Image (cartoon, grey):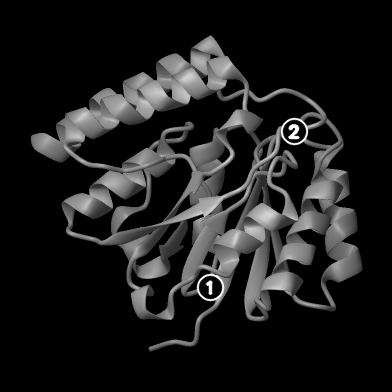
């Protein structure tokens, strides 16, 4: 078996004000968690601000210290598309994506990294939010409703679909998402479970982003998510 190596995908879309802070938090959590074998992959999803310049500056300053890569998409594909691009550039045994919106404190990331179970390296680590009150009430309601509906449809007991999950690379090769939008992790998890992949849960602490607003709960994105779920039902039960 290959030595554990974590590929950390950092997707970005117009996050010029949050990239640097997110990156610093990540490095701090890696050091605290004693994760030494890793690579960092920035994927810019067609940003129209100065995100690419920020990424280039970070890479210039840190490329001599560890493996750090980038991928700049010409047009905006969506979070799922950015993740898929990052996976194709990765060389690790395991993969995680971390948003560059600075909404995950070092404590929360360390809770995930230190919970990696060497006896369960073939399983998906699915994280869930412990401090749910860190999110707005409307966001919590939408998230809980989404989780309940999916668990009813697909007869599962997943605590949270959209957390910072760690996937074995070999599972992603078989179940890499086709969805470009926010439902990409739902697709990966459910299709992997259909293929009898096991998982374990890890609680993590989050914080609300300080700069900018999330695009996840815009009406257009919500409609696209449910469109993706409709296609997923067909793939899961019919195809």
Q: Specify the quadrant that holds the C terminus.
A: top left
Which of the marked residues, 2 or 1, is nearer the chain's N terminus? 1
Please give left or right for residue 111 compared with residue 190 in the image: right
> Which residue is painted at 81% across and 31% down in the image?
210
Q: Which of 142 and 17 is in front in this view?
A: 142
Q: Residues within 10 Å of mark 2 (few under 14, many from 20)?
A: some
Q: Which of 8 and 42 is in front in this view?
A: 8
> Which residue is painted at 48% across and 69% down in the image?
94
As drawn, the residue found furthest toward the left would be 238
Location of mark 2 (residue): 209
Image coordinates for residue 1, horizontal then vertical, percent: 38, 89
> Which residue is painted at 53% across and 58% down in the image?
96
Q: Answer yes or no: do the residues labelled 2 and 1 have beta carbons within 8 Å?
A: no
Where disc 1 sits, the SS reads loop
Image coordinates for residue 41, horizontal then vertical, percent: 66, 60
Q: Quadrant of residue 156?
A: top left
Please give left or right for residue 152 compared with residue 30 in the image: left
Location of mark 1 (residue): 91
Where disc 2 sits, the SS reads loop
Q: Residues within 10 Å of mark 1 (few under 14, many from 20)?
A: some
Q: In which quarter of the image is residue 64?
A: bottom right
Image coordinates for residue 26, horizontal then vertical, percent: 74, 59
Total numbered circles: 2
Q: Nearer the viewer, mark 2 or mark 1?
A: 2
Q: What distance separates the C-alpha of mark 2 from that of mark 1?
A: 30 Å
Please give left or right for residue 79 compared with residue 156 in the image: right
> Which residue is painted at 19% across and 35% down in the image?
154
Image coordinates for residue 205, horizontal then vertical, percent: 62, 47
Q: Quadrant of residue 233?
A: top left
Q: In this view, does 212 lie above or below 58?
A: above
Q: Is residue 39 above or below residue 226?
A: below
């Amino acid at each position: 078996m290959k030595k554990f190596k974590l590929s950390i995908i950092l997707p970005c879309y117009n996050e010029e004000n949050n990239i640097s802070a997110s990156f610093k938090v990540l490095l701090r959590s890696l050091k605290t968690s004693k994760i030494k074998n890793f690579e960092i992959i920035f994927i810019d999803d067609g940003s129209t601000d100065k995100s690419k310049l920020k990424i280039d500056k970070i890479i210039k300053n840190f490329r001599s210290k560890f493996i750090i890569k980038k991928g700049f998409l010409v047009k905006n594909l969506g979070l799922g598309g950015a993740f898929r691009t990052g996976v194709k550039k990765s060389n690790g045994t395991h993969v995680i994506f971390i948003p560059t919106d600075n909404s995950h404190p070092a404590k929360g990331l360390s809770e995930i990294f230190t919970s990696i179970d060497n006896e369960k390296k073939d399983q998906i680590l699915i994280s869930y939010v412990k401090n749910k009150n860190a999110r707005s009430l409307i966001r919590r309601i939408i998230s809980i409703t989404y989780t309940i509906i999916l668990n009813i449809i697909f007869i599962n007991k997943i605590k949270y679909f959209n957390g910072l999950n760690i996937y074995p690379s070999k599972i992603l090769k078989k179940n890499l998402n086709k969805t470009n939008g926010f439902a990409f992790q739902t697709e990966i998890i459910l299709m992997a479970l259909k293929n009898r992949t096991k998982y374990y849960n890890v609680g993590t602490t989050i914080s609300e982003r300080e700069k900018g607003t999330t695009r996840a709960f815009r009406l257009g994105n919500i409609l696209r998510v449910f469109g993706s779920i409709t296609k997923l039902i067909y793939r899961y039960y019919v195809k």
